[in-house]
Amino acid sequence: MRELVDYVAPLLALCRQAGELICRHYHAPGDAAARAKADASPITLADTESHALLQAGLRALEPALPILSEESPPATLVGRREWRRYWLVDPLDGTKEFIAGTGEFTINIALIDAHRPLLGLLYLPLEREAHVGIPGQGAHAYRCREDGSWVRSTLAARSLLPGRPLTVLASRRHRNTSLDSCLA
């Protein structure tokens, strides 16, 4: 197993490829059409193609690690509670936003060990920007240049102080009374 920081460059490259695939569907008329999954949530061709690309890339990166993806068939999830270390993936988080054309969707990848995240990456395909966090090593934003290289900047966290306003981000599609009561 490699050092956590050594995963960042290949994961950024993989997300850029998946992001380009997703953007091609996003900008193509009619390509955001969806069908319903068993749980009635929508799935698009962009979801399934991004899933396949990310799964192949993660298998090439760490062949021994299982992958738990939102788009994995249920049969592949048998025994997942026994997994110590695995990839957790949402190949297109925000499918409803993708379909609605809001541009508010991401690719999410985490490396999990003993039920705790070791590394988390959120990639915004339309902005060509990623946010990467590694416990104990901080969080960084990466912006992809036109030439494919990445510019890194450190994200600074601020302490929660009494009386200081807190900003909370939530999906407009998942707003409900439970969330509202937490925020009240």
Image (cartoon, rainbow, N blue to C red):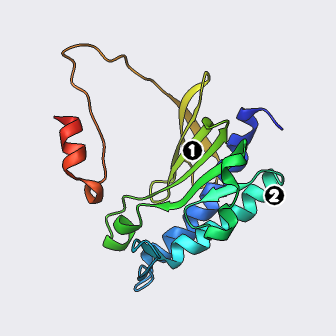
- First reached walking from the N terminus: tag 1 or tag 2: 2
Q: In the image, residue 173 lies at what x, y percent?
A: 28, 60
Q: Are marks 1 and 2 in contact (CB under 8 Å)?
A: no
Say which residue appears at 52% left-offset and 69% top-offset: 22
Q: Determine the residue positioned at 42% across, 59% down.
A: 105
Three-letter residue code for mark 1: Leu
Give coordinates of residue 6: x percent, y percent: 76, 37
Label 1 to label 2: alpha-carbon separation: 18 Å
Q: Quadrant of the N terminus?
A: top right
Q: Which mark is residue 121?
A: 1
The secondary element bearing badge 1 is classed as strand
- The residue pinned by badge 2 equals 60
Q: Is residue 57 left or right of residue 178?
A: right
Q: Determine whether 129 is above or below 43 in the image.
A: above
Q: Amino acid at mark 2?
A: Ala
Q: Position of residue 124 (x, y in %)?
A: 47, 53
Residue at x 57% of width, y 73% of height: 48
How packed mark 1 is, by other alpha carbons closer than 10 Å (few <14, some 14-19, many 20 or more), is: many
Left or right of 174 in this view: 151? right
Local SS, label 2:
helix
Q: Residue furthest top?
A: 162
| Residue 39 rendering spot, x and y as whole percentages | 43, 71
